[in-house]
Image (cartoon, coloured by chain):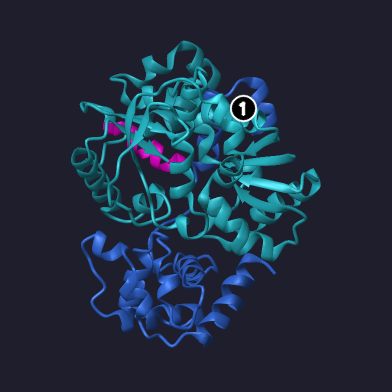
Chain colours: A cyan, B blue
Amino acid sequence: MAVTFWYGCNMTRHGEVIRATLRLMQAVGITAEATGGPASCCGAPKEPDARIAGAMGARTVAQFNASGTGHVVTWCPTCHMNMQDVMAPATPTNFETLHVTELLHASRDALRPLLTRHVPARVLLHRHLGFDGRVPVNRLVADLLALVPGLELVEHELDLPGHMCSALAAVPGGLAQAQRATLAAMAESGADTLCTIFHSCHRELVGLEQGRAFRVANWVHLLAEAAGWDIADDYKAWRNAPDPRAAVGADGLASVGEAVFDRLVAPELRRPRPV
Amino acid sequence: MTLASAIRDDGARLAAACTACGACAAACPSPPFLGRPVTDPVAAATGLRATLRGEAPTAEGIAWIADCTRSGQCAAACPEALDVPYMMRLAGMRLRGALGEAPAIAGSADTGWAARVKAFGRLTMTEEEQARWL
């Protein structure tokens, strides 16, 4: 089976997750070509202008149609919903849209022999309500984590509003309230690992590690760990470093450029924590 | 169909089927979570319907649409089985000025988005991965 893995735009902060997801797909016999970033955007970042957002979405559908793979596998719930709600209705498609959790969950019997390393962790799954009604990601990811030896998924009733944390970050007070509730759930459940499902949640939650005795990991990080793959979360290290510039290092600064780092990267890595 | 025509045409079509009963706003978990619950769900739903018609929305409607975080719980609540999450999305775009009208909800497009996405890609991907994936 050949697919286009449409990872979205803001996932570029986590090249290691894209890489590991491709490797997971490859391990179960799926040939995937990754694409994302501004060149294949759903248009969501430009929604305040329907002309621009609509043109971006139409261009992306045309690109996927031309790829001829027949399946576009999404990571980002915003991309997924935009494809189904506004992009595909506007521009005829010759592919089916699936979420990556659906694809990997359907192949979990093939994944199981790969996940042999013990990952001792008491894991609270960071769940949102929004996308789960479209694709049952909360159950699918829980089932995938259940394949990991040594991992215990703890029970807690917390289901946050929104489809992912970026939606809460866009409304006044939303992110702080969500993080307070998440911290309370971590304490009440006795979890030592907070597992994110989506990239925007991960981006917002990794900063909670600072000064606290738990870790934040994405579900792909945990599967990769169980497979014995080296998967460093550089973004988390930079975000929690006392000096993000030093943490990124000379090679990183050279690859991105000093001016771009100062203008675009450093402000994000140094932004205040909501709680 | 374009996104602009979807906002206009799908919005009008769905508004025509909406009774503004308020069940959607009453079921929405976002405002209470944010500490500002919807006090008049019918007024909020009336504002949603007006927005989709291109009419002046109620203050309650603007506040509710601004607090939408895409929780999706409105879908199951609608007695007419309308796609309320899609209605909220169309209304949100419209109130943020997507059709060129004066925005009623703050929030402009992120002008640094594309460059920032690329910058992080240069930090986390190899040159070969950038060439293939970006």
Q: Secondary structure at mark 1?
A: helix
In the rendered image, the vertical position of residue A43 relative to residue A111, given as above or below: below
Residue A204 counted in the magenta span: yes
Chief secondary structure of the magenta portion: helix
On-image quarter of the N terminus of chain B: bottom right
- In the image: residue B38, left or right of residue A78: left
Residue A168 picture location, percent across and down: 35, 52
Which chain does the numbered disc 1 sit on? A
- Along the viewing direction, whichever of B45 and B53 lies nearer the viewer: B45
Residues in magenta, as a range:
A197-208
Reading the image, the residue beneath label 1 is A23
On-image quarter of the C terminus of chain B: top right
Residue A76 picture location, percent across and down: 53, 46
Residue A213 picture location, percent across and down: 22, 26
Camera sees residue B35: yes
Camera sees residue B110: no
- Marker count (numbered): 1
- Along the viewing direction, whichever of A141 and B96 lies nearer the viewer: A141
- Give the residue at x 46% y 28%: A221
